[in-house]
Image (cartoon, grey):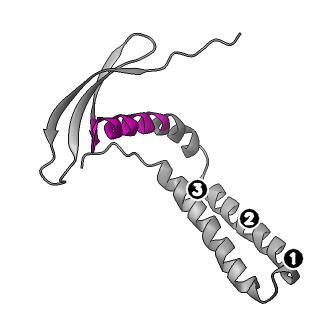
Amino acid sequence: MSKKTQKSRAIHAELRKESKTFDGWLKYEITIMHHDGTTETVPAYGKDLQDALSRVVHDQKVEKIIPKMKKVPLSLYVIFWFAIIGLSTHALFEHQSEFGEFVGLVFIGAMLTITSLFIGISNYFKLKNVPK
């Protein structure tokens, strides 16, 4: 039988104010109880309470991952990106007879997909619970 890990929980949320600069955005004060029993009050921004809570959870996950990612040098990420581009180009042109005259479109689509994937991953690791 596996042991469930205790998670942090929001135990209290209070609406502080509505944004004057961004219509529809709200600022909440969320009290979080951590698994060790300590509590922490954090500001949370969102269009509603559920949005604000999801931003707090996202930021907590990102804050755990970022120190690990910063240990990897940027040059390694660039090398990894070029390696994937190179491997996909090699695979595409090895099988170009299957794509016929559309090989150029498939190549451009593959490059756009790979680049979009890398940009999407990098955007995921940006903090979202910032003042609006």
- SS under mark 1: loop
Q: Residue at x 57, y 44 (%)?
A: 69
Residue 69 - label = none
- SS under mark 3: helix
Badge 2 amino acid: Ala
Q: Which residue is drawn at 64% across and 11% down?
A: 3
Quarter of the view holding residue 58: top left
- Which residue is identified by label 1? 95
- How many numbered discs? 3
Find residue 109 and report its horizontal and vertical position in percent.
Answer: 65, 75
Tell me the CA gap for discs 3 and 2. Answer: 14 Å
- Which residue is identified by label 2? 83
Q: Which residue is drawn at 48% across and 39% down?
A: 62
Front: mark 3 or 2: 2
Horizontally, residue 130 falls left or right of residue 115, namely left
Depicted 38 relative to depicted 92: above or below: above
Span shown in magenta = 44-61
Badge 1 amino acid: His
Quarter of the view holding residue 14: top left
Find residue 65 and report its horizontal and vertical position in percent.
Answer: 54, 38
Give the class, few, some or many, for how many residues have Cα within 10 Å of label 1's Cα (few <14, many ≥20).
Answer: few
